Image (cartoon, rainbow, N blue to C red):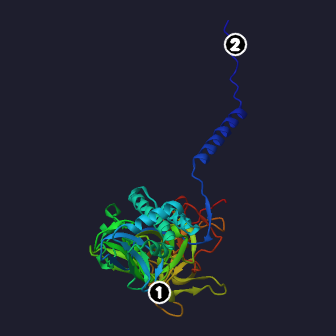
Amino acid sequence: MPRYRHPLNINVGMIIFAIIFVYMAFSVYTYAKKEKVQFYEVVEGDIVTDYGYTGIILRQEEVQYSDRAGYIHYYVREGKRAAVGARIYSIDETGSLASLLEEKNETNAILTNENFSEVKRLLSSFAMNYSDLDFDMTYSLHSTLDASVSEYVNFNTLESLDSMMGQTGAVFWQVEAPASGVVSYGIDKYESLEPSQITADHFNRSSYAKEITKAGQRIASSDPVYKLITSDDWSIIFPLTEQQLEEYSGRTHLHVIFNSRNLETDGAFSVISGADGKSYGKLDFSQYMVQFISDRYVNFEVEAERMDGLKIPVTAVTSKDFYLIPLEFIAQGGDSSDTGFLKEVYSEKGTSIEFVPVTIYNSTEEYYFIDMGEKSPLKAGDFVIKPDSTERYQIGARESLQGVYNINKGYAVFKQIEILKSNEEYYTIRKGMDYGLSVYDHIVLNADLVYEGQLIYQ
């Protein structure tokens, strides 16, 4: 007897449910994989790129030399101004003064609060400007501090020097300043360097050396012992790249920031040619010279020129082609306020003129920029008629504009921009442009993800 077979019952509901489930799963997967359209709110602002430099300081420096050998002792501290005829240093040919000072310092080696403040300033400046690439700065600092502390101790003792010498009968030579100026003791052979003599090698600090004669040190005749800076005018020379040359073109002043001194000021700017034929920036100042008296090299920043504009991401910018139509062909649509053009239309009944409204994306002194997309009522080869005239213009000329997609109305609308400044992430664009952007407009963050007229859900 044959086995009974149950009929195959197909559950339509289960099939529909399975189809819906597969569709939803596919939709969720597609949505998850699809790159999302994000927006950016336009803000006012500027791209500020402060360029950092290391420059060489040039001043009016006159090196002074000793006319005899002996032990030197200073009366004027580094960075202090001396008048004509002021005592600068003394030469003790026998060494008796050195012995007296040593004996006096052993019992009264005191540093004042002013001395400690100056040492702290030197250390702070070193820390702010230090770089592993310029390790030689450490040796220069050591020499400067060693000489400074010795000078402080001797200066404090020298206040009673005249009475001491009178009691002992010792004899020494005192040397006075030949001119008024600021005293400095670091000699580096760049004192007579002129801006036109600068080369790239001058910025290689591995070969730079500065000598400081210490108080109590024995010197030979004709040795350099100090220098006088006879003017408050000073300059900084620094190398420039081609990009920086272009950016500073036409500028006569730059805003300079000295972070190590917590100082900001403006300097008169010019471009000079060095002895190696390269271009260098030159900043001229008439104040603050004393604050850099011990420095030949200085680190500083130049604040970029600020522009009043709108700030947008680089990724939001795209380009689009437009038809060009002369300004004199613009027309208005009868009773409406719509702007457009009078298009020549051909039919079996003959030629007629039809007003077509258009969206204008930009204008120059000669042309309007008109959409050339598929939905545009004007196509290449069409003729438009000049109002109140028989003059015709055939559409065909085109030009590209840079712009972004504005999505204020829920769909992508191209808006032109004019870029003023840029970096790797942002553009500063001109604000207040006709047919352009305004503050708080919403634009597509990545222009590559959308097209003109696309609906955007924010």
- Check residue 4 in the rendering and tell me which mark sits there, or answer none: 2
Q: Residues within 10 Å of mark 2 (few under 14, many from 20)?
A: few
Q: Position of residue 33 (x, y in %)?
A: 57, 46
Q: Nearer the viewer, residue 415 or 379?
A: 415
Looking at the image, is mark 2 or mark 1 earlier in the sequence? Answer: 2
Q: CA distance from mark 2 to mark 1?
A: 91 Å
Left or right, 244 with respect to 8, comes to left
Residue that extends furthest to the top in the rendered view of this protein: 1
- Mark 2 or mark 1: which is in front? 1
Residue 39 in percent (x, y) is at 62, 61
Local crowd at mark 1 within 10 Å, few (<14), some, or many (≥20)?
A: few
Residue at position x 50%, y 78% from top?
A: 288
Residue that label 1 marks:
366
Question: Quarter of the image holding residue 73?
Answer: bottom left
From the image, which quarter does the C terminus lie in? bottom right
Judge left or right: residue 196 versus residue 369: left
Q: Quadrant of the N terminus?
A: top right
**Callout 2 touching callout 1 (CB < 8 Å):** no
Q: Residue at x 42, y 85 (%)?
A: 85
Residue 318, position as x, y percentages in the image: 50, 66
- Judge whether residue 77 can be spotted in this image: no
Q: Residue furthest left?
A: 276
| x, y percent for residue 413 | 59, 69
Amino acid at the residue labelled 1: Glu
Q: Amino acid at mark 2?
A: Tyr
Towards the viewer: 213 or 360: 213
